[in-house]
């Protein structure tokens, strides 16, 4: 079954948000392969339960809007708002996420195969310079530039007036990003 | 006068070699306390150097297996165990631990017999491990003495455990390493009876993380735990250790990013941790602290009722609060109630460690504001 873009609504209880770079990846995949699974829509009111991001990507892209001018595939569910909300939560909380070191293995393999250029990684995955380098390398030694590191000087504690022996106070190593 | 670092004209690696020689010259028995992490790996290879230099045979290594050790770390520890120059003692003792979720603390006994009976051990105990039974202990209860008391049993004469503790890891560790001026890196283990002839030797105390990685990979061309490469790819913290206590669990996302299958196993054993994973970034702990603290000692009692799960945690929290209350009576500004609530909800708890609020903390800022307001009211 198909529904026109203008017929579909994103309900105000929609709890998902897609970041711009992720939206670009989604747009790229739809340019290449179209919509591979139908949007899940509440029959009463045509509220999108699952697929709001795809709808957003299509509406925000001229080529995709033209391509799907005759409508997008939908799967209608006959349910009330409460059940629609519950399904929305189920579908989104039950979604897996990518594991970085496994993704790194795929990226390396794609690069080795010769089928993927740097432009392909940028265009299709929105994976740019630093991230691509990290995925292709994947070692803490290179990541932290350990070969260029010179050993620190040894030290001993002494009792002295402030600022007379060391110019800056000791600092502690911190995780690379906030708690998560 | 303050404690400061006086830098020497030698590298930290050369200094560590001098220190470890001194430790081997001074103590009858020297063991490496190994965790599978990069720092204890560096210490292990320093010990290997001196064993080869002096023909001492295999390096004696102690591994304290705390059950919630991730598979990738275990793979590495097993690899090290099989090195022909390593003689490893693998301990699986009933350590007292906790599972902390959004401020709620629950005691757990790692390798505890009760959880085993419920099928909730994170993994099976390895064969050949030294267990509670080896010491005639009841495996349903946490160890009655500090763990070092058990791991040093059977060692001859004066004993040194070389550890990979570094000052750069945290300000607490830095402070512990500048307390003594002479042999600052040789210290007595916290909580152990003074009659027990055991010392910790923190020979790489002045190393930075890159010193450690350079030493392992360039001077010894040695492997390190694969966790660190995964941490590099995922922007995770470079620390291995049990992941569910009050500090580590705040970075449970690192476990999900590096070893999602390990997270799943933890979730099977402790389903409550998923709330932490999902909601910690949005959890307003500061408001919670203020809400309870604003109700004074009634609020403190409610924190204990609401957030301490089980008699062990409740008893410890009550003991800690009683200690704090005595100190508050003498110096209310240094021991404000919100500092107590913060400690109960967020920090490590011991009955004797009620410390005054320090500078550059939220509690301290509040204390200064209150004092200013009080002074203004008195003046005006």
Image (cartoon, rainbow, N blue to C red):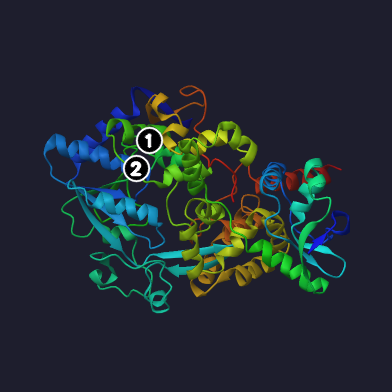
Which chain's residue wears label 1?
B
Splitting the image into 4 quarters, where does residue A11 fall?
bottom right
**B59 left or right of B233?**
left
Q: Nearer the viewer, residue B332 or A147?
A: A147
Residue B321 visible to an observer of this rendering:
no
Q: Are marks 1 and 2 in contact (CB under 8 Å)?
A: yes
At a point 34% along the width and 42% down the height, the residue shown is: B224
Is B231 located above or below residue B255 in the figure? Answer: above
* Relative to A73, A114 lies left or right: left
Name the one closer to the observer, A28 or A163: A28
**On-image quarter of the C terminus of chain B:** top right
Label number found at residue A171: none
Q: Which residue is mark 2?
A: B224
Q: Residue A96: where, in percent of width, then height?
A: 59, 58
- The answer to which of B240 and A26 lies nearer the viewer is A26
Which residue sits at x=29%, y=28%? B14
Vertical placement of residue A74 versus A110, above or below: below
Q: Mark 1 packing: few (<14 Cα in 10 Å), some, or many (20+)? A: many
Q: Earlier in the sequence, mark 1 or mark 2?
A: 1
Q: Which residue is mark 1?
A: B213
Residue B48 horizontal/vertical position (percent): 21, 40
Decide: few, some or many residues near mark 2? Use Cα within 10 Å; few <14, some 14-19, many ≥20. many
Q: CA–CA distance between discs 1 and 2? A: 9 Å
Q: Is residue A145 left or right of residue B76?
A: right
Q: Nearer the viewer, mark 1 or mark 2?
A: 2
The image position of residue B203, as x and y in percent, is 31, 38
Chain under disc 2:
B
Identify the residue at image location x=26%, y=37%. Answer: B46
In depth, the one of B171 and A33 nearer the eye is A33
Label 2: which secondary element: loop
Q: Position of residue B343 (x, y in %)?
A: 58, 57
């Amino acid at each position: 079954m198909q529904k026109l873009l203008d017929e579909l609504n994103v309900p105000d209880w929609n709890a998902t948000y897609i970041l711009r770079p992720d939206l670009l990846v989604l747009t790229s995949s739809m340019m290449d392969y179209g919509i591979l699974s139908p949007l899940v829509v509440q029959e009463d009111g045509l509220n999108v339960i699952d697929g709001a991001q795809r709808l957003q990507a299509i509406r925000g892209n001229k080529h995709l809007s033209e391509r799907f001018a005759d409508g997008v595939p939908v799967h209608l569910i006959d349910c009330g708002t409460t059940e629609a909300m519950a399904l929305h939560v189920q579908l989104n909380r039950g979604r897996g996420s990518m594991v970085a070191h496994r993704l790194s293995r795929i990226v390396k393999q794609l690069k080795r195969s010769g089928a993927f250029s740097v432009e392909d990684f940028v265009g299709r995955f929105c994976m740019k310079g630093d991230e691509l380098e990290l995925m292709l390398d994947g070692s803490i030694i290179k990541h932290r530039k350990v070969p260029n590191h010179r050993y620190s000087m040894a030290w001993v504690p002494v009792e002295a007036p402030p600022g007379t022996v060391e110019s800056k106070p000791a600092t502690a190593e911190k995780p690379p990003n906030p708690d998560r | 006068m303050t404690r400061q670092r006086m830098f020497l004209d030698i590298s930290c690696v050369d200094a560590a070699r001098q220190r470890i020689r001194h430790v081997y010259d001074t103590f009858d028995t020297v063991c490496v306390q190994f965790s599978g992490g990069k720092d204890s790996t560096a210490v292990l290879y320093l010990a290997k150097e001196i064993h080869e230099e002096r023909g001492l045979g295999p390096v004696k290594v102690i591994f304290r297996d705390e059950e919630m050790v991730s598979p990738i770390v275990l793979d590495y520890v097993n690899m090290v165990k099989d090195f022909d120059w390593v003689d490893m003692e693998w301990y699986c003792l009933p350590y007292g631990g906790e599972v902390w979720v959004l401020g709620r603390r629950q005691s757990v006994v790692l390798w505890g017999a009760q959880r085993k009976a419920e099928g909730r051990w994170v993994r099976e105990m390895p064969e050949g491990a030294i267990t509670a039974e080896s010491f005639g202990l009841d495996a349903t209860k946490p160890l009655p003495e500090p763990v070092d008391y058990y791991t040093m049993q059977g060692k001859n004469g004066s004993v040194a455990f070389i550890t990979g503790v570094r000052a750069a890891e945290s300000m607490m560790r830095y402070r512990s390493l500048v307390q003594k001026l002479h042999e600052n890196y040789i210290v007595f283990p916290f909580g152990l009876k003074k009659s027990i002839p055991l010392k910790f030797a923190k020979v790489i105390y002045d190393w930075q993380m890159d010193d450690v990685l350079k030493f392992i990979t360039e001077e010894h061309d040695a492997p390190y735990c694969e966790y660190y490469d995964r941490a590099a790819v995922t922007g995770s913290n470079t620390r291995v250790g049990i992941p569910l206590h009050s500090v580590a669990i705040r970075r449970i996302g690192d476990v999900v990013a590096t070893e999602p299958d390990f997270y799943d196993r933890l979730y099977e054993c402790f389903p409550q941790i998923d709330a932490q994973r999902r909601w910690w970034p949005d959890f307003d702990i500061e408001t919670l602290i203020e809400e309870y603290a604003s109700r004074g000692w009634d609020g403190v009692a409610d924190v204990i009722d609401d957030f301490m799960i089980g008699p062990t945690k409740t008893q410890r929290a009550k003991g800690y609060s009683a200690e704090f209350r005595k100190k508050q009576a003498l110096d209310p500004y240094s021991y404000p109630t919100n500092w107590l609530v913060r400690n109960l909800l967020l920090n490590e708890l011991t009955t004797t460690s009620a410390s005054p609020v320090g500078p550059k903390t939220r509690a301290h800022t509040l204390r200064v504001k209150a004092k200013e307001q009080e002074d203004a009211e008195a003046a005006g």
